[in-house]
Each structure stands twice: as structure tokens, then as C-alpha cells.
């Protein structure tokens, strides 16, 4: 092996032990260090906790001089700096949380060459004179931590990272090492291209390793929203399930759930809306083991180094697979068996759509801002007035979002003091490309939840870890349904077995290649008499597919200019000879514990409305309770009035089915409204307030 003869092997090992106190390299660290010591540019993609920092810190010491480290978060910077200082190294930081005097001192130290490491935030490069100062004395090595922030395809895109490529040129020939835990192949290419990795005629060395985590058992489970807090509490009741991190979608959810869990456990919320020192206390208490559960928004976790987290629980659908992987990666860093559980339902998808519409405003809104800008700088606080004069009214939040997007895509330029000037005119297309991309990321998460493939293998594949053998993990809910904590697998009963044969019969034949049918059609053909709900029927089909007898394809058709998704089933080769004996391998999944109470036949699951199923549809003929009936009447009257105002028929506002579902659910918030089939963000924006007002009035 060339490694044994390399001149760096001995010194690197010695450095590792003497400076860092580690006895051995972890998997892949040595090869990365060697490439960096030799001066190659490096792209290093390894999961959180794998030990990426060492891969720039050790080469930095081996090469000598000052290493320049660019890091997007103050907390990360402080954490790394403190660790290096504890090792007796000379470290300085420059970020907005520190005084001017300390920044000046850091610069002096840098120019004098007395520093081992200088940490800076990327926005510092916008300060006039600062990049020039750096260029006066070339760093021994440049490390760019969390490098995915440079890519608009990454989940933490930071406009300030964009400028790095341009500034790096002035710091050459210093080698650059870009580190990230979360890069899809697309993001990887973007990092290499934008940072201009590769220099002196050499390609960058790319290392992508270690995405498979053998000790994480991943579970994905559909649970109706209202049942999730109680179910979470049950799952965490086993002391072996703690310490735990619970991820909640919003600050409000985090607070509420922390309060609820706080009744039985030592739990606290953590989110960006809390005071920094409060957050700090929560984080410290969790690290010290005084808190056993943190209920957090995604703000929590970057740089958190707690080895014994036993459970990571998501109480809602995450918006990207990259973010999700990063979050579950915080479980079991000590290598001991750990579990991750993702709860979701169709209501989550609607909520994401809602956020999507908020975060990716219509291009016209960006255009309105673009049009009022000019060469003369305008302070961003003056923008609302200018827009008003141009007859464009935007809420502050809408304005901020639209401006943020315009800045990202270069249609506007913001300076250090908050002044905005006109940017270039080519921002529209990249903006549209990006918003489409965000939409497809969400689709990717949904496919992950619906797929019948090993969960870990899907994730590894997603990150382009091509050296991985892609074998099933053997412990996720797909590979090992029997060990799931959230669901029980049971064999089919007699009536389900009969139905399974009918499904096979309905799909058999159909000429060449066998027939395929939409699952909705199958349901209406086969279940009209037996009364099985659509959801239970879909469960049966999924079980047949998981056992290899059916193939289920997510597909769609176009109708009136809209894309309508549906599921299509066909027989596999094995399905063609399905027998009672085969049926013994088919396992149906049922929710465990309190969540199973929600699994009563009618409302068990919410699925795509396009699949012909909507909440309450199974109960359509049942009489409503007194209060609900009264509410239904008032809603009907209100709908009629709205329809008259708009000169439209009443069902265009929404159909009777939706009216009835609202009366039954008695929603209290927009979030509740989103969970009702037939109500999407557009309707809620128009009518949400009116509906909630009526519901509040009858309470
Ligand atoms: P990453 O940046 O990849 O998320 P870190 O660099 O923060 O991970 O490292 C995670 C933890 O692993 C740190 O506590 C670090 O000290 C430790 N670590 C890194 N390399 C080694 C090693 N070779 N031996 C033992 N511990 C290590
Ligand atoms: Mg790191």
C-alpha cells in the first residue's frame, strides 16, 4: 500500500496523538489528511460526527502557517475555537458577536503570523479592506466548513458564501478544503464549481464516505397529527429511548410539545425565538444529561456533539432528505443501537405546500421590488414607501421574503449598512429554477416515506456514496417490520386473504404484460360490498407490494390543466402465482399504542384527495352532532353570501363534502384548516379568516 511508504505517515500519526490526543484515525480521515497536507484541494463529504474537523485541523498544523477557517455559524466557530484552544493552540475569531478591538487584535495576530487558526464568518469578506488584509499573508490552508451553504441547492443556502470563490483567488496558492455533511451529487458539483476547487493543474481530491449508519434503525410511520404528542410521549417512556431529540416543525409546536413532554420527562424547547443565553442553558443542560429530551426546531443541532442520543423523533415531515439525514444523524454517535422515528400524514404535505408558497413568492412580487430599485442606494426600510407609491402593497414579511430571493439571485444588491441598489436583470430564470427544485425536494421526501425500499439504502443512494454496497440495513421498518416500535405486523385474516385473491384476479390477464389498474378503481370494484375503507385497502395493497406480489407506481394524469397524482398497481411475476401459502409472508402493519385509537376504520389515514379519498368521506351519510349541524348551517349561509359576492356558484367556493368536514373538525387555526381535504393554501388565504370566524362564533 502506498500509504505505508508515504513520508507523512509517521508525522501525521505523531501529530494526531500529540496534538489531538487521539490514538488512531477514524475511517477515511488519514487519506483525507494526506491529500490536504500535500496541498491538494479537497472536497470532503462525510456525515455529521464522522470527524471532519480533524481533516483540516491536522493538515493545518502539518503544513504550518495560519489556517483560515470560514464557518457560517457563531456557535460552530466558538465551539471549534474553544476545542483548539484547549489543545494549547493559538486561535482567533472574528464575528459579529465580538468587539471591534478583538477583531483588530485578531488581524494583528494574523499579519504577525502568530496564529494557528483564524476563524471568520463569510460576511466579514464584505467589509472593505478585509479581503486585502488577508491576502497580505497567504494562509497555510483554507477550510470552508458547512460548504453546502454555497449552493442554492443545499438546504442552508447562504448568500454570503457566494462570494467565497471570488475571494479565494486572491489567497491562492493556499489549498482549499471544503467540508460538508450534507451534499447531494448536485450540491457536490456546485461546491467544486463555485469555489473553483482544483489548482496548479490538479483536480480536487473528492472524498464521499460513511453515509451508512449501521446502528440507526429508521422508522417511518403515518400518524394523524392530533395523536402525535401522546404517541411521542409513549415512545419516549422507555428509559432506553432517552436522551432524545424531538424535531418539531414550528416554534409553537416545539413549545407545546416540550410543555406536554415536560409533565413526564425532563424536557425543554429549543428554537431560534428564545434568548441566546436561554438556548445556551438548554443546550448545556442537555449535553450534561440534566435534560433528557430537547424539543427543537431545525435551529438545534449544528455542532451539537452529544454521543449518547438514543432517539431522534420527527413529529412532522421534514422538507428535505438532506436535512432529515442530518437530523437523524445526531442519534447514536457512540455507535450503540439507536432509533429514529418519523411521523407524518397527508396533512404535512399540505402544510409544506403552504410554507412553500410563503417562502417562494410569485415572481411578480420580486419584479415589483426590482422595478423600484435604481443606481442610487435606497435603505431597505424605505422600500415599503416606494412600493406603496408604485401601487404595490406588501406586508413586511412578504417584502422581506421577496427581497431575500431577489438578493440571492442578484436582482438587487445589499450593502453592509442595509442599502439596496439595482442588480443585474438575469435573476428570473434562476429564481424559477430554484423554486421548482425546492418543490422536487419535497417530492423526494414523500417518495422516501412511501417507498418499499430499505430506508438506510435510500438515504445512502441519495448522497451518491457509490462505494457503499447498497445492501438492506436489516433493522429499519422496511427490512425488519417485526422490530418496529411504532407498528405491529400481523398476518392477513380470512376476509383480507379473500380480498388479496380478488386483487390478484382483477389484475391478472389483461393481455400482454398483465393489466394494471389505479388503486382507486380497484377499491371501488372490490370493496363496494365488503365496506373496507380506501385507507385499509391501500394498506393491504402496500403489504402485498412489500411482500413482492404487487408493483405500485406513483403516477399522474393531466386534467383541465392540472396534474392529478394517483397510484397504479400491477402484478409482479410472483404475484401471478399467488397462493394461500404465499399469503403467509404478507404482513399488515398497524399502529401501536395510543395512536392505534386513531386507526378506527373511517378516519384512519388521510391520503391524497386525488386518490378519491377525503376526510370524512366515509361518514358522509352519518348525521352530524347538534353543534356540528348548527355550524354546517352557518357555513352554508356564509358560503352562499360569498358566492354571490363573487358571482360564482357556491360549490366553487368549496363543495358540500368540504363544508361538512369543516363542520365536523371545527378548526381553530389555519393549520387545522390545512388538514381538511379540499382546503389548500389558496383557499385558506381567501376564505380562512371567514371560516375560522364562524367556527369561533359557534363555540
Ligand atoms: P463533523 O464535523 O464531521 O460533524 P467533528 O469534527 O465535530 O465531526 O468530530 C466529531 C467528534 O469526533 C469530535 O468530538 C471529535 O473530537 C471526535 N473525533 C474526531 N476524530 C477522532 C479520532 N480520530 N479519534 C477519536 N475521536 C475523534
Ligand atoms: Mg463539523
Image: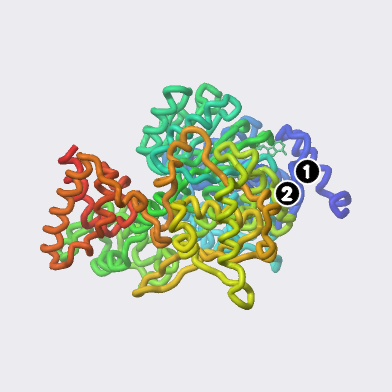
Q: Residue 125 location, x and y as percent? A: 47, 53
Task: Identify whether 247 is placed above or below 413.
Answer: above
Regarding residue 174, the answer to whether it shows in the image is no
Q: Is residue 492 visible?
A: yes
The answer to the question of whether label 2 and label 1 lie on touching residues, with beta carbons closer than 8 A, is yes
Instruction: From this view, report whether residue 17 is shown above or below residue 171.
Output: above
With respect to residue 587, does 412 lie above or below? below
Question: Image point 67% across, 59% down: which residue?
Answer: 578
Label 2 packing within 10 angstroms: few (<14), some (14-19), many (20+): many
Compared across the picture, whether 529 is left or right of 90 comes to: left
Question: Spatial distance from mark 2 to mark 1, Cα to Cα?
Answer: 8 Å
Quadrant of picture, ligand 1: top right
Q: Where residue 279 sits: x, y (%)?
A: 43, 31
| Residue 24 drawn at (x, y percent) | 78, 38
**Quarter of the image that includes the C terminus:** top left
Viewer-nearest residue: 77 or 696: 696
* Tag of residue 530: none
- In the picture of the structure, the residue carrying the numbered disc 2 is 33
Ligand 1 near label 2 (Cβ, under 8 Å)? no
Residue at left 60%, top 47%?
492
> Which residue has dot 1 on it?
12
Q: In the rendered image, which quarter is residue 289 located in?
A: top right
**300 and 180: which one is in front?**
300
Identify which residue, 669 or 364, lies in the foreground.
Answer: 669
Q: Is residue 16 above or below residue 523?
A: above
Asked which colour scheme the image uses, the reply is: rainbow
Q: Residues within 10 Å of mark 1 (few under 14, many from 20)?
A: many
Horizontal and vertical percent for residue 511?
A: 61, 77
Q: Secondary structure at mark 1?
A: helix
The first of marks 2 and 1 along the sequence is 1
Amino acid at each position: 500500500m502506498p500509504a505505508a511508504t508515504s513520508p507523512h505517515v509517521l508525522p501525521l500519526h505523531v501529530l494526531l496523538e500529540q496534538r489531538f490526543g487521539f490514538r488512531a484515525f477514524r475511517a477515511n480521515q488519514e487519506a483525507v489528511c494526506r491529500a490536504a497536507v500535500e496541498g491538494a484541494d479537497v472536497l470532503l463529504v462525510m456525515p455529521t460526527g464522522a470527524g471532519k474537523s480533524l481533516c483540516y485541523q491536522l493538515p493545518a498544523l502539518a503544513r504550518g502557517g495560519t489556517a483560515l477557517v470560514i464557518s457560517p455559524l457563531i456557535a460552530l466557530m466558538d465551539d471549534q475555537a474553544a476545542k483548539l484552544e484547549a489543545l494549547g493552540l493559538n486561535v482567533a475569531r472574528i464575528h459579529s458577536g465580538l468587539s471591534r478591538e478583538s477583531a483588530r487584535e485578531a488581524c494583528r495576530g494574523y499579519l504577525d503570523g502568530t496564529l494557528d487558526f483564524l476563524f471568520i464568518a463569510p460576511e466579514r469578506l464584505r467589509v472593505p479592506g478585509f479581503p486585502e488584509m488577508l491576502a497580505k499573508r497567504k494562509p497555510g490552508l483554507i477550510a470552508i466548513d458547512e460548504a453546502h451553504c454555497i449552493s442554492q441547492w443545499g438546504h442552508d443556502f447562504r448568500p454570503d458564501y457566494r462570494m467565497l470563490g471570488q475571494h479565494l483567488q486572491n489567497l491562492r496558492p493556499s489549498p482549499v478544503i471544503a467540508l460538508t455533511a450534507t451534499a447531494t451529487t448536485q450540491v457536490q458539483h456546485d461546491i467544486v464549481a463555485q469555489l473553483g476547487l482544483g489548482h496548479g493543474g490538479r483536480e480536487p481530491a473528492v472524498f464521499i464516505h460513511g453515509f451508512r449508519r449501521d446502528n440507526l434503525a429508521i422508522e417511518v410511520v403515518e400518524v394523524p397529527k392530533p395523536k402525535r404528542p401522546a404517541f411521542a410521549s409513549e415512545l419516549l417512556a422507555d428509559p432506553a429511548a432517552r436522551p432524545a431529540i424531538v424535531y418539531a416543525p414550528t416554534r409553537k409546536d416545539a413549545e407545546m410539545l416540550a410543555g406536554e413532554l415536560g409533565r413526564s420527562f425532563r424536557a425543554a424547547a429549543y428554537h431560534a425565538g428564545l434568548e441566546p443565553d436561554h438556548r445556551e442553558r438548554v443546550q448545556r443542560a442537555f449535553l450534561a444529561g440534566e435534560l433528557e429530551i430537547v424539543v427543537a426546531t431545525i435551529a438545534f443541532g449544528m455542532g451539537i456533539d452529544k454521543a449518547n442520543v438514543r432517539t431522534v423523533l420527527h413529529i412532522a415531515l421534514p422538507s428535505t432528505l438532506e436535512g432529515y439525514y442530518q437530523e437523524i444523524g445526531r442519534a447514536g454517535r457512540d455507535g450503540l443501537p439507536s432509533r429514529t422515528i418519523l411521523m407524518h400524514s397527508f396533512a404535512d404535505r399540505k402544510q409544506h405546500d403552504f410554507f412553500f408558497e410563503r417562502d417562494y413568492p410569485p415572481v411578480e412580487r420580486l419584479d415589483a421590488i426590482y422595478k423600484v430599485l435604481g443606481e442610487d442606494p435606497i435603505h431597505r426600510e424605505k422600500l415599503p414607501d416606494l412600493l406603496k407609491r408604485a401601487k404595490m402593497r406588501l406586508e413586511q414579511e412578504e417584502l422581506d421574503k421577496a427581497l431575500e430571493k431577489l438578493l440571492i439571485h442578484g436582482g438587487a444588491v445589499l450593502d453592509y449598512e442595509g442599502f439596496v441598489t439595482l442588480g443585474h436583470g438575469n435573476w428570473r430564470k434562476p429564481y424559477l429554477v430554484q423554486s421548482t427544485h425546492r418543490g422536487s425536494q419535497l417530492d423526494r421526501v414523500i417518495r422516501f416515506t412511501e417507498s418499499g425500499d430499505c430506508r438506510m439504502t435510500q438515504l445512502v443512494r441519495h448522497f451518491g456514496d457509490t462505494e457503499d454496497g447498497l445492501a438492506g440495513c436489516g433493522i429499519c421498518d422496511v427490512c425488519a417490520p417485526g422490530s418496529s416500535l411504532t407498528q405491529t405486523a400481523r398476518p392477513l385474516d380470512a376476509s383480507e386473504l379473500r380480498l388479496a385473491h380478488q386483487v390478484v384476479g382483477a389484475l391478472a390477464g389483461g393481455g400482454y404484460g398483465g393489466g394494471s389498474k389505479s388503486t382507486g378503481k380497484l377499491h371501488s370494484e372490490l370493496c363496494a360490498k365488503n365496506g373496507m375503507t380506501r385507507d385499509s385497502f391501500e394498506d393491504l395493497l402496500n403489504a402485498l407490494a412489500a411482500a413482492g406480489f404487487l408493483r405500485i407506481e406513483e403516477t399522474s394524469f393531466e386534467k383541465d390543466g392540472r396534474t392529478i397524482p394517483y397510484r397504479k398497481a400491477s402484478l409482479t411475476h410472483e404475484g401471478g402465482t399467488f397462493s394461500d401459502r404465499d399469503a403467509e409472508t404478507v404482513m399488515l402493519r398497524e399502529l401501536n399504542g395510543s395512536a392505534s385509537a386513531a386507526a378506527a376504520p373511517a378516519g384512519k389515514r388521510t391520503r391524497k384527495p386525488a386518490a378519491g379519498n377525503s376526510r370524512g368521506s366515509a361518514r358522509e351519510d352519518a348525521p352530524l352532532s347538534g353543534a356540528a349541524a348548527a355550524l354546517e348551517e352557518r357555513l352554508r349561509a356564509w358560503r352562499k353570501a360569498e358566492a354571490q359576492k363573487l358571482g360564482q356558484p357556491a360549490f366553487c367556493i368549496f363543495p358540500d363534502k368540504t363544508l361538512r368536514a369543516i363542520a365536523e373538525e371545527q378548526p381553530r387555526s389555519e393549520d387545522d384548516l390545512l388538514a381538511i381535504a379540499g382546503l389548500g393554501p389558496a383557499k385558506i388565504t381567501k376564505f380562512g379568516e371567514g371560516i375560522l370566524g364562524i367556527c369561533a362564533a359557534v363555540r
